[in-house]
Image (cartoon, coloured by chain):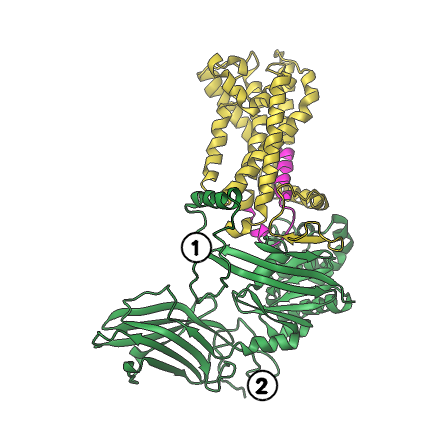
Chain colours: A green, B yellow
Amino acid sequence: MSTPVIKVENLSKAYQLGKIGTGTISRDIERFWITKVMGKEDPFLKIGETNDRSVKGQSDIVWSLKDINFEINQGDAVGIIGRNGAGKSTLLKLLSRVTGPTTGEIKVKGRIASLLEVGTGFHPELTGKENIYLNGAILGMRKKEITRKLDEIIDFSGVERYIDTPVKRYSSGMYVRLAFAVAAHLESEILIVDEVLAVGDAEFQKKCLGKMGDISKGQGRTVLFVSHNMASVQNLCTKGIMLEHGMIKAVGNIEEVVREYLSKSRAEDVVLADISKRKGNGKLRFVHGHVGCEDNETIETFKNLTIKLDFNLDPTVVIAQKRIDIGINNFMGDRVAWLSTSNINDAFNIQNNSIEFTIKNLPLAPGDYSCNIYSEINNEVADWLTEVMDFSIAEKDYYQSGKLVPRNQGSILLNYNIK
Amino acid sequence: MKNDNPSPDWDLVIKGHTSLFDVKFRDLWHYRDLLVMFVKRDFVSFYKQTVLGPLWFFIQPIFTTIVFSLVFGKLAGISTDGLPQFLFYLSGITAWQYFADCLTKTSTVFRDNANIFGKVYFPRLIMPLSIVVSNLVRFGVQLLLFFGVMIYFALNGADFSPTYGILFFPVLIILMAFLGLGIGLIITAITTKYKDLSFLVTFGVQLLMYATTVIYPLSAAPEAYKKYIQLNPMTGIIEAFRFAFLGKGEFTAWSIGYSAVFTLIMLFLGIIIFNKTEKNFVDTV
């Protein structure tokens, strides 16, 4: 039964950073000249740089995926996990042929249906039924195939009453139900699903997950599932692939891969000295950062979190005023918390060349975060770095209820009880 | 990359670099139902929640014709080859508009559909093809208007007569559609990188109309400019269209042959460039 249905060989995808489209005609001509006329290697694709957001690269090209190799067998349910920017979405896009790889190849046996988003191509003016046909056709179904399954789709969606109403009059929940219903009834050997299930109400989510389980277990089809939600990944999948900085970090049994992923929420050491994207006069310069909990195990909510910064000082400067701030941003880049020496009476000795902030009973919700670090010497900006020192707080059963804390329910966890 | 022929076990091989001529016509055929859906969608969404509905298809050519008759016919007094002015302009506008619509609408395919193209795969060519077919429906409706006006003038004793050229009418439609499609495909592929080109299209098409025999017959063009006007591949098509239905205009094997060759080259180039662009355009738009 273990015939491979997807084989990925040396797959890489490069993206160009910065502006595309300004002054590129001359560059395009230069590139064309070097690669096509002179037959040399493309100089704009420098080999060997990984996609690490915290390190400023040498060229404008970043490898979102780098030399990926794996095989997926028929009937496998594979969870693809990794932090934001690890290359999960890029991998999905390549697999679903939305964009092409830079090098390498993917071999596929059977039809692929991908759900990067439900309801792609829905037209607000068309009725529910018309949209089922349109969306089905976009996903690659033939008309008679849709007609054959129409009743089943409408039944699954649970919007029979409104099926002849334009979808612009639908509630967003109904819209998603209908869209998922179409996608779930695709007859494909391989199904690729992004985190689209994070929509709709709890009951419908359960229905979707159940349907996906049926697809992989009951019907022997292959499912690739990308999610941040370790609980549903573990529930649905038998195998796992973990990506980090565009490379495969772990492959194998889902339990092991998830454990590996969670252990990544452990202390993070970051070299700050060679980041070139920084502002300030350099009278103080951050060289090293560390985020972690006291036991050096996973970073978890309600533990004490320590952020330690090491820095160098310009020995010629007489320090009259000093200040160090840390801003914590969530994965969307929104500020969730701020720590500053300017706002607290604790004294610190800057001549130690290091400072340690300790947050007691960390209230932040599970997820990915990054820090902005800022320093001031004699009322002038000395060193200022943004979006550095990424860390993640592990998903865990924080309230001992046997359930994970749901995402999108606020950015802090409260220590509460009910009577 | 080592061996180019994929092992027969695999149904699909996704590679970074493919040959220039790797157009997936089989895929295109498989998705033919989608083309029909897109056409239906365009048509339905066009007249839903409008008062006049499909009547809008008539309003634009009628008003343009009236304005042209006033400005170019009455004020400027440009010859219409002895044909009734209204009929002359309407024939030019109807045919030109189909070409212009095919061109301008396909020239923004990548930009208009970036969202859907970025989420799901289907042969991208389906989209421009559906535009050409949608416009064909519209053209067909406008043609009815033209026929109506023809009958009206015939009953009132106007001097014109359809010729054997009508037999070539299907060929003319295909030429107009493919010429617009071919140029549109090239432009949409280039505009994914160089966006300013799209500004050129709107007024470029408008200007091109004046270099085509829409508002004047080729016979009335000054001798010095005539050969440039004939270089425009649409001239041969519009002239042939008039000759077919109204009996006036230049219709030679040369003029139509030139347009046909030009169209085929454009279509060929368009499909290749479009096909080359579609793989990675999601990254640049």
SS class, disc 2: loop
What's the chain of the residue with tag 1? A
State the residue in front, B73 or B250.
Answer: B250
Give residue A18's mark.
Answer: 1
Q: Position of residue A48 (x, y in %)?
A: 50, 61
The three-letter code of the residue at mark 2 reads Gln
State the residue in front, B84 or B28.
Answer: B28
In this figure, which residue is indicated by the disc labeled 2?
A400
Task: Specify whether A391 is left or right of B155.
Answer: left
The three-letter code of the residue at mark 1 reads Gly
| Callout 1 crowding tier (Cα within 10 Å): few <14, some 14–19, many ≥20 | few
What's the chain of the residue with tag 2? A
Q: Position of residue A314 (x, y in %)?
A: 26, 73
Q: Upstream in the sequence, badge 2 or badge 1? A: 1
User: Can residue A175 be seen by looking at this rendering?
Assistant: no
Task: Specify whether B11 is left or right of A256.
Answer: right
Quadrant hosting residue A176: bottom right
Number of callouts in the render?
A: 2
Q: Nearer the viewer, mark 2 or mark 1?
A: 1
Residue at the (48%, 68%) spot, across then down: A331
**Real-space Cα separation, disc 2 to disc 1, in angstroms:** 46 Å
Q: Position of residue A198 (x, y in %)?
A: 59, 67
Q: Position of residue B169 (x, y in %)?
A: 67, 23
Q: Is residue B132 magenta?
A: yes
Q: Is residue A227 magenta?
A: no
Give residue A4's mark.
Answer: none
Report the magenta residues as a range: B112-138
Magenta region, mostly helix, strand or loop?
Answer: helix
Position above or below: A250 against A22:
below
Position above or below: A365 against B31:
below
